[in-house]
Amino acid sequence: MRLIFITLLALVIATAVGLGATWMTATRGTDFGTLRIGAWTARPKTGTADVDPYSRASIARAGDLPIGQGDGVAFLATTDDKKKPLDGRCDVVVSGVTPAARFWTLTLYDLKGRLVANSLQRYGFTSEEIIRGADGSFEVRMASRSRAGNWLPTGGIERYALMLRLYDTPVGVATRTPRDAPMPAIATAGCP
Amino acid sequence: MIRLLFTILAGVLLGGVVHLVSVLALPRIASQDAYSRLSAITKLNAVTPLPLADPGNTLMPYMDPAFATAICRYDLSSGPIKLAVPVSQAYTSVSFYTRSDVAYYAINDRSAGRKVIELNLMTEAQHADLPEDEDITAADRLIIDSPTSTGLIVLKALAAEPGLMPLAQASLAAASCRTDTAPPEAPPPKAAAPAAKR
């Protein structure tokens, strides 16, 4: 009787620990091969054949298709440079320059990866349509109400994520430091 | 007491095994992965345009709204696939995914270096069966080995501005993806054309 109880307890713990750890890693992701520049994170290896098993599990669970390495690389940010979560009710400014790439797109998603509805039907910018300063740098302002310049509507949602995708770029598996890939800064400029 | 601690320790160790097995098994058992989501709405061995990314479209997470996308879901068991994608104005790319959503190859218009990205996709066995001389004469055609016999080809064309989206969609609509069965026999009889003119 006692042996059965102990075996059952061990099996229950094993199931809870094992599946719990799998759930955590598949939803939150792991740090294997993660490239971190400022608030931006990318996993260039997910676009290659030697993607790690944890990334494969989270890709299968989320149902997305990772961007292939010969195509480009995707950087995701859910916080600003001071680790404050991106809040759609605040004004958030993304400014600076981007790494070398033929094209890039900056897109705003909710935390499940869906686009955020707005009356302008503007969900992001491409490198071609953005208004730049004389030195080539740019400034995009995320806010719920309209702003001058490059305005990206947040729809007033509480939390959102920004994705900067670089297409046809040397940034990838070999990139290690911010010097190889100067990413734009993200700053919360003010909350109502 | 010691027995209980031992039980917990054994449980945690066994949990590690469960974790590793489940992580490795997840891509196989996932029913909502991209391939499963797309296989319901795409044709086999043909190009299917995807609806544009917008807030109502929850086909896949993190779709880029600046791109027109089309999918060729392939099955190589009946022969290699011939893919031809005309290059759009701004940027065109072709990415290859296995049945389990691993991106094993991607190419863009610049690395293809032509007006049309032309590729032959085949399994390693089919590649090995190619006659030697044909391999040389076809050297200007890019041959890609697929690790699995089924998978996805994702064709993307950038619309640098929202107004250019119809152009990007049109260039993908001209793409073709089909099974390359036996080489075309005789060229279509030309003699018929002048006869018809008379």
Image: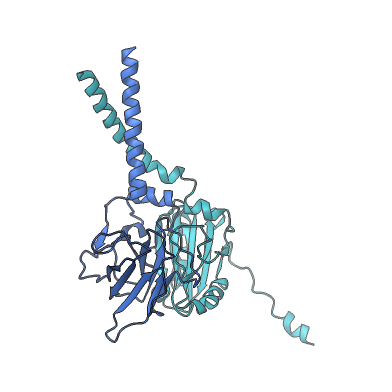
Above or below residue A69? Residue A24 is above
- Give A174 or B3, whichever is nearer the viewer: B3
Q: Residue at x 34, y 16 (%)?
A: A4
Whole-percent x, y for residue A81 in the image: 24, 64
To which quarter of the image does residue B106 belong?
A: bottom left
Q: Residue at x 35, y 22 (%)?
A: A8
Count all numbered tags in the image, as a single digit. 0
Of all residues, the one furthest to the front in this rendering is A192
Above or below residue B173? Residue B103 is above
Q: Residue at x 36, y 47 (%)?
A: A26
Quadrant of the drawing holding the N terminus of chain B: top left
- Give A8 or A137, whichever is nearer the viewer: A137
Q: Which chain wears cyan?
A: B
- Give B73 or A15, whichever is nearer the viewer: A15
Whole-percent x, y for residue A68 in the image: 39, 63
To which quarter of the image does residue A78 belong?
A: bottom left
Q: Does residue A170 appear in the picture of this structure?
A: yes
- Name the colour scheme: by chain
Q: Which chain wears blue?
A: A
Residue A126 left/right relative to A169? right
Whole-percent x, y for residue B139 in the image: 43, 71
Whole-percent x, y for residue A37 in the image: 24, 64
Q: Does residue B130 appear in the picture of this structure?
A: no
Of all residues, the one furthest to the top in this rendering is A1
Residue B83 left/right relative to A5? right
Quadrant of the drawing holding the C terminus of chain B: bottom right
To which quarter of the image does residue A164 belong?
A: bottom left
Above or below residue B164? Residue A77 is above
Residue B109 left/right relative to A80? right
